[in-house]
Amino acid sequence: MDQEEALTAVDSIVTQFNTYEDFLDSQITTMDLYYLEDEGLARQLVELGYRGTGEVVKREDFEARKAAIEIARLAERTQRKTLTSAGKDLQDNFLKALAMREEDNRNGKMSSVIFIRDRNSHGQEVSGYIDYAHRLKIEDFEVYFSGKRRLLPRHTDMSFYNWDSHIAVWKSTPNYQVIADNPEGLLFKYKRDRKILRVDPKAQPGDNSTRTPIQTELYIQAVIFDHISRRKT
């Protein structure tokens, strides 16, 4: 039996029995108890491999795999709890699109850039590009997924433009380097794999990247760019 098969066998046993003693007891036959007349001795013989009807599993291996499986279970449950979109009755396509991408942006499997164009609370038309993964880390998205507030670009995002005051701001994030002074227009370089993301609708978005316009009632215009990093971490 190779290492992978051995781990699979141990995992099967670990998930079947709550304690190592329960596993040992399952290996003891009525005949063993009849001749040995001592349950403790019977358990010791099974643990040493002298008795038993199945796989020999050491106590330390059982307890180590039991702990590892429990840690993985708790981590998965914690991850589900941290998804602020979980359990929300989302009606608009934009919020549904964000919810679909939330987990992968949190764990680094995907990096999404959100373009939004709409009017702010002062009635001014604004637009900008938002590093979704970065905003998820520094802000609670509960207010957006619950519909209490609308997600809008800020001066601290990757780019911000106020069409009324003509104020334009660019800012790199932990995930992207902003390249503003380029003949091709505004570019974003993903820092992990150094791939260029092109946001010009007339151009291809770049390697391992996609551009998805979102039909939404919340904004004048919304587009999501998704980038999948191929760099091994």
Image: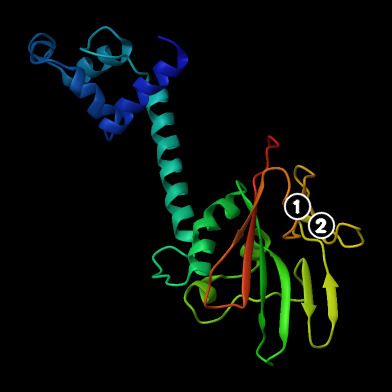
Residue nearest the viewer, comparing 23 with 175: 175
Q: Is residue 197 above or below residue 73?
A: below
Residue shown at the point (53%, 72%) measured from the top left = 216
Image position, residue 145 (x, y; %): 49, 72
Write down the quadrant of residue 38 in the picture: top left
Name the residue: 66% across, 72% down: 116
| Of pointers 1 and 2, the one earlier in the residue sequence | 2
Q: Depth check: give the residue in front, 172 or 114.
A: 114
Numbered mark located on residue 187 in the image: 2
Task: Report x, y in % for residue 207.
Answer: 72, 43
Q: Is residue 36 left or right of residue 107?
A: left
* Kind of residue at disc 1: Leu
Q: Helix, strand or loop at disc 1?
A: strand
- Pointer 1 with pointer 2, Cβ within 8 A: yes
Q: Quadrant of the C terminus?
A: top right
Q: Is residue 140 above or below residue 189?
A: below
Rendered position, 51 above or below 160: above
Q: CA distance from mark 1 to mark 2?
A: 6 Å
Q: Badge 2: few (under 14), some or many (20 or more) residues near its Cα, within 10 Å?
A: many
Q: Secondary structure at mark 2?
A: strand
- In depth, the one of 100 and 34 nearer the eye is 100
Image-based side of 46 in relation to 3, left or right: left
Tag 2: amino acid: Leu
In the displayed structure, does residue 109 sit left or right of residue 49?
A: right
Residue 82 is labelled as none
Tell me the number on the disc at residue 197: 1
Q: Quadrant of the N terminus?
A: top left
Q: Position of residue 127 (x, y in %)?
A: 72, 75
Query: Looking at the image, which residue is at 69% across and 66% down?
Result: 130
Nearer-the-camera pick, 107 or 74: 107
Quarter location, residue 27: top left
Give the residue displayed 44% in from the left and 11% down from the top: 2
